[in-house]
Image: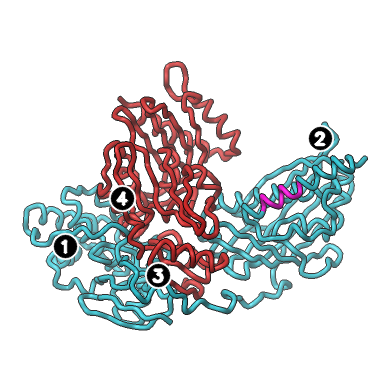
Amino acid sequence: MIPICLTVNGRVVSKTIEPRTHLADFLRERLNLTATHLRCEQGACGACTLLIDGQPARSCITYVALCEGADITTVEGLEDDPIMVALRRAFSKEHGLQCGYCTPGMLVTARDIVMRLSNADQARIRTELSGNLCRCTGYVGIVRAISHVVDERRRGELAGIVRQEGPLGPVGARPAGSNSGRVTNAPTAAPSARKETSLGEIALGLGGRQPNVEIKQSFVVSRSPADVWNFFSDIAHVVPCLPGASLIRPPAGEHVEGKMSVKLGPITANFVGHARIMRDDAQQRGVIMGAGNDQSGGSRAAGEAEYVLEPTASGGTRVMLTIRALLVGPLAQFGRSGIVEDIVARITEAFAYNLEARLTGAVSVDDQSVQAPLKVGTLFRQVMWARMKAMFATIFVGPKP
Amino acid sequence: MKPVAFDIVRARSLAEATRLLAESGGTARLVAGAQSLGPMLNLRLAQPRLLIDITGIPDLTRIEDTDDSVTIGACVSTANIEDGRLPGRGLDTLPAVAAHIAYRAVRNRGTIGGSLCHADPAADWVSTLCALGAECLITGVNGKRRLLADQFISGAYQTALAADEILEAIRVPRLSAGGRCGYYKVCRKAGEFAMAIGVVLNDLDRGVFRVVIGATKGRPIVITDARDLQRADESIDDDAILRVFDKHGIVDRIARRQKLAALARAYNQAMKP
C-alpha cells in the first residue's frame, strides 16, 4: 500500500492505496463517486472519461499513483458548470441518452469539444466523439445536442469559461516529490498463478470450430527428408528446438505434455498444454492436435498443425507447416492477429536454425542449453551460437557424410 | 479486468530512473502516460513487478529549438503536439499526425516517447518518426547514445533499448522550405489502430525522398530512395510497391490493397507542389 494525495472535485483527498488501483476504481470504490462508469477497462469505450487538470482523460488506464497532486473533476463536480448545465439541457431535449451508461463520458467529451473547438461542425463533432461508444442512441441526438451548445458558445452565451493550457506532459503528472524514488511494495510472490486446469479437461484440436489464426510457414534444412523424418520421430529431440519450450514429462506414445513461454516486449505468456502427434510414414506427413492455457494471462488456444516434408533440388528438405488455431481470452481480445503470426514466424525461424544445428551435429541432440523464453536478443544469440558451432564443426570436423 | 499486483515508484531524475531499471533485473517497466501499457496491464498481457513512473522528471518535457531540428522530450504528450506547442517551422506533419492518434482523452496523457518505446507496429509515431529520419536520444547507466528511429524499433513491441536505458528525447530534423510530407492511414474506425500506414517524405533539397510502409507485423518497412517506386512520369508504380510487399512477406490480399492505397495517397500528398 502507498499513500496518495490529490484533489477531487475541489476537495483534497489523502488515502492509502494499492499501487495497481486505477483512477475510476478509486473514485467509485473509495470515494463513492459513481458517476464515472466503467465498461471496457482498456481505454476503448470512453465510459470512464473524466477531467484531469481540466482536460478529458481515461480513468481506467490511468493509475491513481501516477496522479499524485493532480486535480480530478468528475461529472459530480460539474453540477454547476455553465457549459455542463447547457449540455445536460441539450442532451435531454435532443434525446441524447437512453440507458445512460455512456452519458457521463459523453458529457465530459462534449464539454471538451465545446471549450476547445468553437467552429466544430457535425462531422468534426462525430470524429471527436469516436472515442465514446453508445449502444442506444445511434449518436444522432448526441451530435445534435453538442452542436447546439457549440452554437450557443459561438454566440457568446457561454463565453465566461476559458480553457487553460497546462504545462507540457501528460495531464495529471507532477514533479516527483521527496517521498519518491523508493521501491517499497514490490510484490514478492510470483505474479498471478492461476488455478491449473487439468489437461485432461481440454479438448484437443479445433473439433470442428472455426480457427481465428491461420498460418502457413515453410523452411529448408540441409539434410534429406529421411533424416528429418527420423529426427521428428523422437519428440524429446524436437521440443528443445522450440525456443522457450520444454516437456513436462516424458512422452507417452502419441501423447505429449509440455509448456512454452513467449515474451514479446511487455507481453509474457506461459502456455501449458498437451498434444497428440500422428505420423504418416508413407507420406512423410505429421498432424499435431493440441490445446493449451496461458498460466499467467488466462488466454486459451486449441488447434491443429500439419507438417509435410518435401525434398529440395540440393538434397535438403523443405518443411511445410500449416497451423490452424482458435485463440480466446486476452491475447485474442487484444485483437492483433498479425502479432500472433509474427511470434509464430519467429519461433519457426528459431526452430529451423536449431533443427539444422542438431541435424548437422553442430549441437548435440540432448543439448538443453538453447532453452530460453523467446526474446529477440536471446534468439539472436542462440542463432549466432548455433551458427558458430555449425561453422566450427564444418571447419574442424568437416561436413558429415 | 484489473491488473496483476505491481508497485509504482516515481523517479525524480533520469539517473534515478536508470538506476531503478538496472536494479530491477528486468522485472520493471517504465511508464509515462500509461495509455498503451495500461490496456496491456488491465488485460494481464503484461505483468511487470514494478512500474517506474518517469513523468515526474522535469527534463523529459523539455523542447529544444534549433535552426535545423526540434528536440522533443520523451514525455511531451501527443495533445501538446496536436495543439501546436512545438516550434513547428517545417514540421507541420507532427500536429497533423497527432490530431488523429486515438482520441483526445488518450492524447492528453499519451506521450510521443512512450508510444515509440511501446513500439506497436500500428502506432502513428513509429511510422512517422521513421519517415522523418528522427533520432532517438538514449540515456543509460553507462552514458548516452543516439539511434535513428528505424534502428531504434527492432520488431513488434521491441526496441534497441538495453535493460538500463531510457529514451530521453527525440530529435526531428526540419523539412526545407520546399519539402513535403504525406501521411495516410487506413482505420476501420476513427481513432483505432491503423491497418495500413503510408508515409512519404519528399524533401529533395535536403537529399531526402523516403517512404515508410507501416502497420506491418514487425518493423516498419523503410525505403530510403522513393525513386525506386516511381514511373518515368513521376507517378507511383504500383507494381514496384507490390514487389516490396512480396519481398517482405505481405501476402494477405486485403492487407496489400490497404497498404497500397495508403502509400499511394501519402505519395500524392507529398508530390503536391
Numbered disc 2: secondary structure? loop
The segment highlighted magenta reads A379-387
Residue annotated with mark 3 = B10
Front of the two marks 3 and 2: 3
In the picture as drawn, the residue positioned furthest to the top comes out as B232
Q: Nearer the viewer, residue B7 or B60?
A: B60
Numbered disc 1: secondary structure? helix
Q: Which chain is cyan?
A: A
Residue A254 in sight in this render? yes
Numbered disc 3: secondary structure? strand
Q: Residues within 10 Å of mark 2 (few under 14, many from 20)?
A: some
Q: Chain of mark 2?
A: A
Q: Nearer the viewer, residue A261 or B112?
A: B112
Q: Amino acid at mark 3?
A: Arg
Residue annotated with mark 1 = A90
Residue annotated with mark 4 = B63
Asked if badges 4 and 1 are on one and the same chain, I answer no
Residue A141 in sight in this render? no
Front of the two marks 4 and 1: 4
